[in-house]
Image (tube, rainbow, N blue to C red):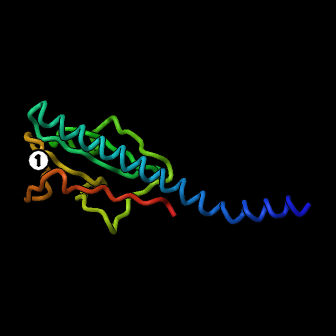
């Protein structure tokens, strides 16, 4: 009986650490997905020699992303890809521009990031994600 109580106490102490570990894995996996999607959009811009846009939006409690030509507004995009459940954008650490309810990054036909009127190398972009509270 004492052994069962000790095991229960140890499990109760380990549960918060396990949950934190699982949340961090979810964030890391989502950051990797966003990075891969950004790189694919950048590659599309250079391959097709057209300005491309990577867009993120929140819809029904989920984050979705899309890659599309700059000439197409995010509201016109028909195919959005969902990211991991339970992960949200952290607005206080977000370096992305926002327009019409979507965050975005634009790549010119050389693959350079264009934020507003300034050009930044693509390595300067950081996706800020945090677990849902």
Residue farthest toward the right in the current orientation of the protein: 1
> Which residue: 89% across, 63% down?
2
> Which residue: 41% across, 42% down?
82
Q: Nearer the viewer, residue 24 or 114?
A: 24
Looking at the image, residue 6 sits to the left or right of residue 51; the answer is right
> Which residue: 30% across, 41% down?
36
Name the spot of residue 120 as percent of width and height, x first.
12, 56
Q: Nearer the viewer, residue 118 or 61?
A: 118
Q: For residue 76, which quarter of the picture?
A: top left
Name the spot of residue 22 as percent of width and height, x first.
54, 53
Q: In the rendered image, which residue does mark 1 sit on?
A: 112
Relative to 82, residue 16 above or below: below
Name the spot of residue 49 as percent of width and height, x first.
8, 33
Q: Quadrant of the N terminus?
A: bottom right
> Which residue: 69% across, 66% down?
13
Judging from the image, what secondary structure is the residue with disc 1 in? loop
Relative to 1, residue 106 above or below: above
Q: For residue 97, which quarter of the picture?
A: bottom left
């Amino acid at each position: 009986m004492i052994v069962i109580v000790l095991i229960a106490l140890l499990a109760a102490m380990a549960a918060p650490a396990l949950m934190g570990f699982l949340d961090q894995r979810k964030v890391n996996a989502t950051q990797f997905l966003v990075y891969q999607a950004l790189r694919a959009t950048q590659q599309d811009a250079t391959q097709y020699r057209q300005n491309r846009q990577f867009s993120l939006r929140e819809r029904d409690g989920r984050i979705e992303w899309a890659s599309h030509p700059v000439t197409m507004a995010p509201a016109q995009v028909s195919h959005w890809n969902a990211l991991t459940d339970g992960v949200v954008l952290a607005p206080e650490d977000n370096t992305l521009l926002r327009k019409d309810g979507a965050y975005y990054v634009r790549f010119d036909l050389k693959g350079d990031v264009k934020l507003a009127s300034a050009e930044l190398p693509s390595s300067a972009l950081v996706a800020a994600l945090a677990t849902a509270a």
